[in-house]
Image (tube, helix red, strand yellow):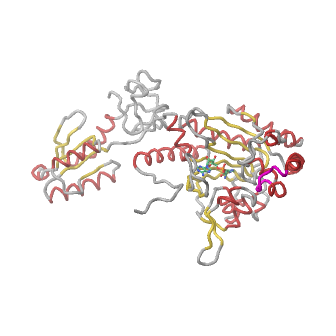
Amino acid sequence: MITKQKGTKDLYGEEAKKWQYVNKVIDEIMEKYNYSFIRVPVFESNELFHRGVGETTDIVTKETYDFVDRGGRNITLRPEGTAGVVRSYIENKMYGDDNKPVKLYYNMPMYRYERPQAGRLREFTQFGMEILGSDDPLSDAEIISLAVNIYKVLGLKGIKVNINSLGDNESRINYKEALINHFKPHYEDLCEDCKERLEKNPLRILDCKIDCNKDYMLTAPITIDYLNKESKSRFEKVQEYLSVIGIDFEVDPKVVRGLDYYNHTVFEVEAKIEGFGSQNVIGGGGRYNGMVQELGGPSTPAIGFAAGLDRLMIALDKENIKIPINNSIDLFLLYVSEEEKKCAAYLTNILRMNGFIVETDYLNRSLKSQFKQADRLNSKFTIVLNSNDLANNEIKIKNNKTKEEEFISIDALIYFLDENLIEDSCDCNSECSCENSCDCHSDKECHCGNNCSCDDNCNCNDDNDCHCGNNCSCGK
Ligand code: HAM
């Protein structure tokens, strides 16, 4: 048997439905924040990541999937989204767009040759967003608050936002010098990688997983002590805006991020959830004002964020957040004869095109087995197609919840389902989103019902009882 590659996973069944739901929520939020969707290729030239992410980062030196293609080109599978998005921004001259800043988001698989463990995969999915063309600290605050709000809307509670500033070029040069002075006396004790880093890029010593607990690591200089006046006041402005928006955060001078392109604001979102494990940084980002120019475009300030979807799903699971997934269908059509089967084929097509979730039998099962299949699919209604009824332009439809059966004309089927499926679902039409018109994002958020705080007149007994979204089970 051929098995999947180490550090990859198959997504299917109920878990796939949860992912689809989370992706839908992300899409909706991004639309509200006015970000446009972008997709860039899975493979790019190797040089893009060397120049974009940084020659001395762990990602580029140890983790990229590199290969030479049949045309002799040096190719890399993208380890992150920002460099590819910036390449596309330059190549497609998006900087010429009158509509500034350019706000983009993506949701795509990334590839890093890391040691797999819970929450750390070799193929993983990131959703991320980038604002290109604004240096306003308000855009820093927008990116951080957008990241936090996605987690909040999904119902995640145990998150902590840590922010820091690396400052502008001048501040970074001063800081680099301080790091060199600090680590030089410990040169002999540094691991081989860090010895090289000390010469090439001392900031990366702070990412070291081998030396990280040594005393001189813990007493290393911190960035904010080396910020010049402008960088300091810029960082204060970001914090001021975050406070105005109501985003809780902590300044953590240890956040330096493992990618080379950052300056000024950097931040990480940590999952503070029991049993989450060591890979608890569920997202991170920062400002990268130099990258567009570095990759051959005009000088363009930019900031962005990316979150690991795999880690987010673990966090939702650990917090027991119930994700509303649809585990039922509207109608199952049963048949016996070939003539009835053709009618089933015709009706399933028409009904699906009219927005209903409809199934029929594809295995030539007995009628008894077809009923079992309808039950397995939690079909709300069933119809046993019968040639005699069909000759009279009639069908007998059964409501599987009330067990009531009635004859209706075939022509009235769409109308019947429309009426009865609406009645069957939650009744509120303000904030909550049953199949009708509301659009809450989770059961927790859905406030229908008596014991819950729906503004409307939905009849479910409490928040838990109400499964709005798909199979709402309010008393109606
Ligand atoms: P990053 O910190 O390398 O940043 O990755 C962002 C997030 O992706 C991490 O916080 C983590 O949740 C997830 N992640 C990273 N590696 C793995 C892995 N091996 N398995 C599972 N999840 C993983 C970036 O990639 C930047 N491009 C973020 C950014 C956007 N900065 C500016 N704009």
Q: Observer-nearest residue: 57 or 267?
A: 57
Residue at far left of view: 388
- The image quadrant of residue 374 is top left
The answer to if 189 sits in the magenta stretch is yes
**Residue ID at (89%, 41%):** 229
**Residue ID at (72%, 35%):** 242
**Residue 69 is at least partly visible in this image:** yes
Q: Looking at the magenta stretch, what is its main secondary structure?
A: helix
Picture quarter with the N terminus: bottom left
Please state the horizontal and vertical placement of residue 12, each as a whole percent of the image. Answer: 42, 51
**Residue 171 is at least partly visible in this image:** no
The answer to if 364 sits in the magenta stretch is no
Q: Observer-nearest residue: 436 or 252?
A: 252
Give the vertical position of 44 relative to 129 (above or below). below
Residue at far front of view: 188
Give the vertical position of 413 relative to 49 (above or below). above
Stretch of the chain drawn in magenta: 187-194
User: In this image, 460 relative to 361: left or right?
Assistant: right
Give the vertical position of 163 relative to 76 (above or below). above
**Residue ID at (74%, 44%):** 212
Please state the horizontal and vertical placement of residue 224, each as a whole percent of the image. Answer: 83, 40
User: In this image, 447 relative to 459: left or right?
Assistant: right
